Image (cartoon, helix red, strand yellow):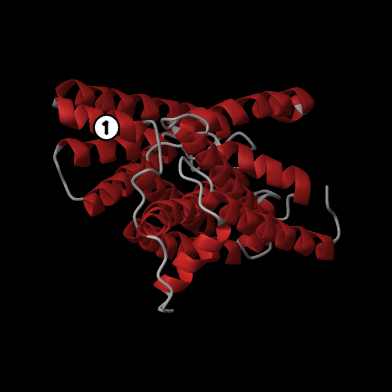
Amino acid sequence: MISDANKKTEFLIISLFLLIIGMIIAVTRGAYNIPIIDVFYTIIYKAGIEIIPEFNNELVVWQIRLPRIFLSVVVGIALATAGTVYQGVFRNPLVEPYLLGVSSAAAFGAAISIVLHLSFLSLQLTSFAFGMIAMILAYTLATVKKETPLINLILAGIVVSAIFSAGLSYLKMTAGYRELRDLVFWLMGGLYTAKWGDVVLLFMLVGISFFVLWSLSWKLNVLTMGDEEAQSLGISVKKIKALCILLATFITSIAIGTVGIIAWVGLIIPHMARMTIGPDHRYLIPASAIIGSLFLLICDTLARTLTSGEIPISVLTSVIAAPYLIFLVRKNRNLYFG
């Protein structure tokens, strides 16, 4: 684990550099490989410089690959940051938005939008609305005498997730063939529908939320010491927790509403970052965001290049992350099971 502050900063810079290298490699790879110089020509042409690239290169690079690459980066930031914040707020390494029913509820909200033929913006809004409803329900059900034991919260999340999963199953049963097909593909997760409009919208919403959460990192550090200690240091525990949960749920829900359910990122990536850079949220939050972006970028690149078709991205994230979780549990059994 990196201990010195300067070394942690260097690690973040190196990780960001690796992310940029990964984006450059990803834009050149695919069913139609494009040399990096042609990618450069396409980008400067779009910037207004009079260099005419090949039509196919312009179409593939600008309209297909670049939006998808940037969307994978933004979604990786959203899911990894949300998982880090949840684990910090609830002081448990196994907590993430999916575990608390947010994903099932957001998927139910998106399914309503798909089945009822609402606009794409409505899909994101319904995902967010139902994600928030799930979080509020789970937190309310788990709270007893103004206390929210972690075990109660997890059990409440399981109950809430089951309720919305049942609603999602009902929508699948009643949907027409076209709506059911769209819903099934969406539920498997994927960035193949990426458009510049999606990227810009998520970049603004996730970017603002990320910097607000990062600005609260020192308060998250205090919260990990316990509620009483935080209150004694002048921290408004309920307000900070509510704001962190709200923003983490928000970015999770809009990410799900845009690309579908992508599992494991919010659970595994914070562990990777924490084992490397330590538990200090001032460094942990940006480290998780960068590693999450790189992880999702790699998975998406593999999803569209390993076979002639496209592998649902959740399949790859599960195949990679599930064995890593088993490794973590075996290595830190006392941490997870006491």
- Residue that sits furthest to the bottom in the current view: 49
Q: Is residue 36 left or right of residue 58?
A: right
Q: Is residue 129 left or right of residue 17?
A: left
Using the rendered view, name the quadrant where residue 149 is placed: top right
Q: Residues within 10 Å of mark 1 (few under 14, many from 20)?
A: many
Q: Is residue 337 left or right of residue 36?
A: right
Query: Visible in this render: residue 228?
Result: yes
Q: Nearer the viewer, residue 167 or 222?
A: 167
Q: Nearer the viewer, residue 127 or 69?
A: 69
Q: Is residue 214 left or right of residue 101?
A: right
- Residue ID at (43%, 74%): 51
In the picture of the structure, the residue carrying the numbered disc 1 is 183
Q: Nearer the viewer, residue 164 or 58?
A: 58
Dot 1: element: helix
- Measured as percent of width and height from the top left, residue 40 is found at 52, 66
Picture layout, residue 62 above or below residue 271 = below
Using the rendered view, name the quadrant where residue 166 is placed: top left
- Residue ID at (49%, 28%): 315
- Measured as percent of width and height from the top left, residue 69 is found at 48, 52
Picture layout, residue 10 above or below residue 228 = below
Q: How many marks?
A: 1
